[in-house]
Amino acid sequence: MAKNGKRPATHNEATRVLVASGVLGFGVSGAELEKGLAMKPHALALDAGSTDSGPAYLATGVSKYSRQATKRDLALLMRTREKGKVPLLIGSCGTSGCDRAVDWTLDIVSEIAREEGMSARVALLYSEQDGRELKTRNKAGLVTPLEPAGALTDEIIDKCSHIVGLLGPEPYIEAVRQGADIVLGGRTTDTAVLAAVPLMRGAQAGSWRACTANSPSA
């Protein structure tokens, strides 16, 4: 049994997650989505952020990819979700995943839904942190730097325009369990949106044997 009390998924019960592109707004292929949908995925999942382009997008809350490009990809994904009746999970909305970026993505989703007559339940996962709360936690010794970063100071916090936490799969799982059709998340680990539904269906986290057929004994 898995630690969460669920029976681990076997090879014959594999969870299929359709990932349309490396990042939202880069260019989703409608033809590839159709082929993926034919494989009966249990979820659509896509990352929308990156730290590779530097901190400017977080500082400004502006997306690296244009609204037009993001809307094009989202429209294709939402149509595919509508056909497949599976959840659509998007992490690190608007490149940075700050609250403003999540709201920006929601505005696009709402516009598409109005234009195409779609009805979907949308869950919003915010990850932006309050600087005052961080100062309090830091003074209490509850903030630990990752090497090689130095200690966090009030001065550093005051210089930040936006501070985001990093979401794992848990809030996505809860949103889907609560009936969300589309989940728009703040700053999120790249793998969280991909892992959420498999974990929810009983896959074991970090288990190579659980997802590989005919694996050799370790």
Image (cartoon, grey):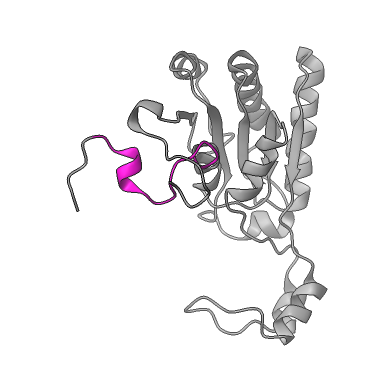
Residue 93: in sight, yes or no?
no
Q: In this view of the protein, which residue sits in the foreground, 33 or 158?
A: 33
Residue range highlighted in magenta = 199-213
User: x, y percentage for residue 209?
Assistant: 30, 44
Is residue 7 within the magenta segment? no
Is residue 202 within the magenta segment? yes
Q: Give the answer, above or below, for where 98 lies relative to 157.
A: above
Q: Residue at x 36, y 33 (%)?
A: 10
Q: Give the answer, above or below, for where 84 lies relative to 107.
A: above
Q: In this view of the protein, which residue sits in the foreground, 218 or 188?
A: 218
Q: Residue at x 55, y 29 (%)?
A: 44
User: x, y percentage for residue 13?
Assistant: 40, 28
For the image, the number of numbered tags is 0
Residue 184: in sight, yes or no?
yes
User: x, y percentage for residue 125?
Assistant: 72, 47
The reply, left or right, for residue 99 in relation to residue 198 is right
Q: Residue at x 58, y 16 (%)?
A: 84
Residue 139's quadrant in the figure? Answer: bottom right
Q: Residue at x 61, y 36 (%)?
A: 89
User: x, y percentage for residue 152?
Assistant: 65, 81
The reply, left or right, for residue 14 in relation to residue 57 is left
Q: In this view of the protein, which residue sits in the foreground, 76 or 125?
A: 125
Q: Give the answer, above or below, for where 196 lies relative to 188.
A: above
In terms of secondary structure, what is the magenta stretch mainly? Answer: loop
